[in-house]
Image (cartoon, grey):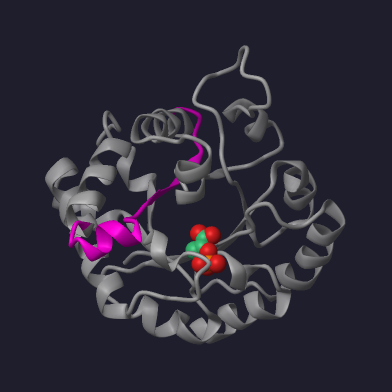
Amino acid sequence: MRKPVIFGNWKMNKTIAETVEFINAVDKEVKDNADWGIGVPYLALAKAKELAGNLNIAAENMHFKDNGAYTGEVSAEMLKEIGIEWVILGHSERRQYFGETDETVNAKTLQALKNGLTPIVCVGETLEQFEADETENVVRTQTAAALKDVCPNCIKKVVIAYEPVWAIGTGKTATNEIAQNVCAIIRDELAKLFGQEAADAVRIQYGGSVKPEGIKTLLEQPDIDGALVGGASLVADSYIAMIENLG
Ligand code: PEP
């Protein structure tokens, strides 16, 4: 039985003061019906981690090297020093705006695992690829590339987020049927790479305009074990509604 895993992704939103306000409102409402968490901008991570008792706190990115001349970057060791255990990697906005590639996502995934962090690895096709019927090929390729050289024992720790780029922040959510079909393809790719037993243990999220009203039926899909939620994770009441609606 895979425990649901639902994370917010705040992107470049919320000051430290706003982070404190959100965690004070939401943390006490968290139930054990999922691993609940939020991806928080670097500057507010330490405060978020200090205040959160129930919410898991994730970084939204991380560098793949241990340390060195990489101005502006943050290492796994720095995240661990403040108690961070989760990191979102390869989000489509990082791929689109910051030159993230399958190779860097792979290097970061290996670095996260080496350091005991749980990576949430994002994959997903663009609108153009969706319309050209390339979704299966894109998600299989991105999944295999991101997980290259991941050891068989480590794979169960990885969370995959399937996020069709056309559904992120657009208000257009994939139907449960589309989301389920693609998450099943990702699980099939995991089975090819790591064997069925490992594939069955990996948690796969859907992300793309998820709203509190849709969370329950989304997670009823057999291959969808969670969600990565942008907009709807920014408002405390909306986050609490997701916790309540999951049941
Ligand atoms: C995201 O940030 O990963 C995301 C899915 O955003 P939204 O829920 O706003 O579409």
Does residue 197 show up magenta in the picture?
no
Q: Which residue is farthest top?
A: 69
Residue in view at x 24 percent, y 65 percent: 131
Against 144, residue 184 (above or below) is: below
Q: Is residue 142 left or right of residue 120?
A: left
Q: Position of residue 53 (x, y in %)?
A: 71, 59
- Along the line of sight, which residue is nearer the eye, 64 or 164? 164
Figure label count: 0
Say if the magenta span includes residue 117: yes
Residue at the image point whose x is 70% and y is 80% from the top: 237
Q: For the point 31% across and 56% down, which residue is it?
A: 125
Q: Residue at x 60, y 27 (%)?
A: 75
Picture quarter with the N terminus:
bottom left
| Residue span colored magenta | 114-134
Q: Residue 203: give x, y in percent of width and height.
A: 35, 58
Q: Position of residue 42 (x, y in %)?
A: 70, 41
Using the image, determine if residue 16 lies above or below residue 110: below
Residue 105 in view in this figure: yes
Give the image quarter of residue 244: bottom right
